[in-house]
Image (cartoon, grey):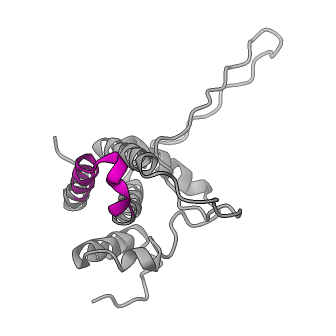
Amino acid sequence: MTRPRPDLWYPLAQLLAALRTLLRAAAPDAFAAIARDARAQLAVLTALVRRYIHILAAETPLPPLRTAAPPTDRKTSAPAPRRDRRALFQLLELPAAPGRPGSGEDPPALQWALLIEAAARLAAVLADPAPHARRLARRFGTLLVPGLRELPVPWHVTRRLAPEVDTLLCAMDQAARPLAWAGINSS
């Protein structure tokens, strides 16, 4: 199966496989030793996958909008049931909600389980990115704020990255936000 934009997909898949291998090899009770690095890798992978989806959405052609059917008599037709579904992956980087910080760290076993679940969600999104790209492409016309933050990950996370990952993050951010990078000479 060919992947959309294999030049971007394969490095993402390799980084995600490395994180999942690290998480599977760690014992849940002894996870505290690698928790900070694993969280940093997950934050970077999430930012990379989000930029990958934005790149695909910008390249996705959408069919013309459907015209609405004429309204029918509301007394005779039953209301359509609303589906309450949450997206598997948040496509937009929204600012964090203001609030108090937590009372403390979660136990290592819980952190491990949450990171395993988050990595599995990223793998599911990366396995089939087309529906997410179409969903974002439909939202591009209605967005009032930019969908991606200026800094993909905080600076203290960027310090922990290998230079290759930082370069990939910059390249994908440049491809996902071309207007923001238009006046910058990145060579």
Residue 120: % across, % down = 34, 43
The reply, left or right, for residue 138 in relation to residue 145 is left
Residue 96: % across, % down = 62, 63
Q: Nearer the viewer, residue 104 or 21?
A: 104
Q: Is residue 177 above or below residue 114?
A: below
Residue drawn at x 27%, y 77% is: 167
**Any magenta on residue 97?**
no
The reply, left or right, for residue 85 in relation to residue 160 is right
Q: Quadrant of the C terminus?
A: bottom left
Q: Magenta stretch: dominant SS? A: helix
Q: Is residue 97 above or below residue 174?
A: above
Range drawn in magenta:
15-35
Residue drawn at x 71%, y 25% is: 70
Residue drawn at x 56%, y 67% is: 146
Residue 172: % across, % down = 33, 69
Q: Residue furthest top?
A: 76
Write down the quadrant of residue 19 in the picture.
Answer: bottom left
**Residue 38 visible within the image:** no
**Residue 64 visible within the image:** yes
Residue 48: % across, % down = 36, 62
